Amino acid sequence: MTAAVVIPNRNGADWLPGCLEGIAAQTVAPAEVVVVDNASSDRSPEAAARHPGVRVIALPTNLGFAAAANRGVAAVDADAVALVNTDVVVAPDWLERTTAALAADPGAGAVACKMVDLRRPELLYDAGNVLRRDGVCEQRGRFQPDDGRFDAPGEVFSACAGAALYRRSALVDVGGFDERLFIYLEDVDLGLRLRLAGWRCLYEPAVARHAGGGSSDQLSPPRAHLAAAARALPLLPAMLRERRRLRAGAALPVQEVVPRLPIRAPRASRSGLQERREAIQ
């Protein structure tokens, strides 16, 4: 199985060198490395182009993570596509392990990994996503000590696209990322559509070190969340119609994809900030 690496970039000059160095150090070299630049103003695309074997695709405007990822997937010719954020440094065996896991399971459409904090790798950032019945996504292990509880391979609901491997045919099958979701949770939406289409998501504890929020701070301007919420309201009727069509044609019922577990998890009422404080203490 061949694997290409796609790195969406937006003003990633502070992070991109470390990310590309991590890719260059892989025990199994990627078939291709593509940086898709979202109209950066910090000369990071020029810096990326100077790295041997790196191809840069320059977008004329900032289209967001989902659009950049889709452009990268369309531009490569490989069996699998690894998406890696600019603020992520993957371990040398990361691509080898995730690709081997995907190749061994023809029913798997994606592979999630063990993401830890870049500066404090003893803290977990994400070990695969869980979609709750109330629609809230939780990241397994978020801000908890990396004490070995997520060291075994397995299966999860979906992968955090900050560092994940996808079967390219599965992405094409479900139409890729929804580009209307400019930033955040586009990977959860993709994970839901992959699961409804019958694809599974594996978990392989290959390590990726992530500076949480490092690259996303560059993707959206101040007050972007409020503006995005306002722009989303007119889309709700169309999205509800799409969801009904999606469920009607799904290979698996939504009750199997999102089991009727307790709607709210034990920690659901506690803020992420509180959890992080407790993990650090």
Image (cartoon, rainbow, N blue to C red):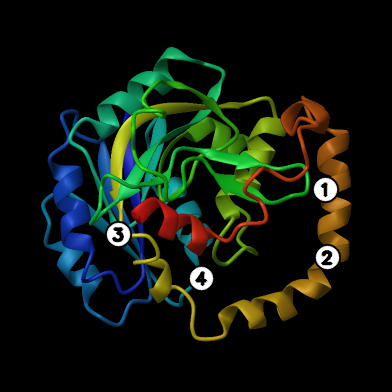
**Whole-number angstrom distance, CA of label 1 to CA of label 3:** 33 Å
Front residue of 104/126: it is 126
User: Closer to the N terminus: mark 2 or mark 4?
Assistant: 4
Amino acid at the residue labelled 4: Leu
How far apart are labels 3 and 4 at the CA level?
Answer: 19 Å
Q: Which residue is mark 2?
A: 236
Comes first in the chain, label 3 or label 2? 3
* Residue at 42% in and 21% down: 153
Question: Along the polypeptide, which appears first: circle 3 or circle 4?
Answer: 4
Residue occupying the point 68% across, 43% down = 265
Q: Nearer the viewer, mark 1 or mark 4?
A: 1
Residue at x-position 36% and y-position 29%: 205
Whether residue 127 sits left or right of residue 194 in the image: it is: left
Quarter of image, res 29: top left
**Frontmost residue, 222 versus 231:** 222
Q: Position of residue 80 (x, y in %)?
A: 41, 32
Residue 200 sits above or below residue 243 on the image: above
Judged from the image, the secondary structure of the residue bearing numbered disc 4 is loop
Q: Is residue 18 left or right of residue 142?
A: left
Q: Which mark is residue 168?
A: none
Report, in whole angstroms, how far the alpha carbon at label 3 lies from the one at label 2: 32 Å
Q: Position of residue 63 (x, y in %)?
A: 51, 70
- Pointer 4 local density, CA inside 10 Å: few below 14, some 14–19, many at least 20: some
Query: Label 2: how many residues lie within 10 Å, few (<14), some (14-19) or many (20+)?
Result: few
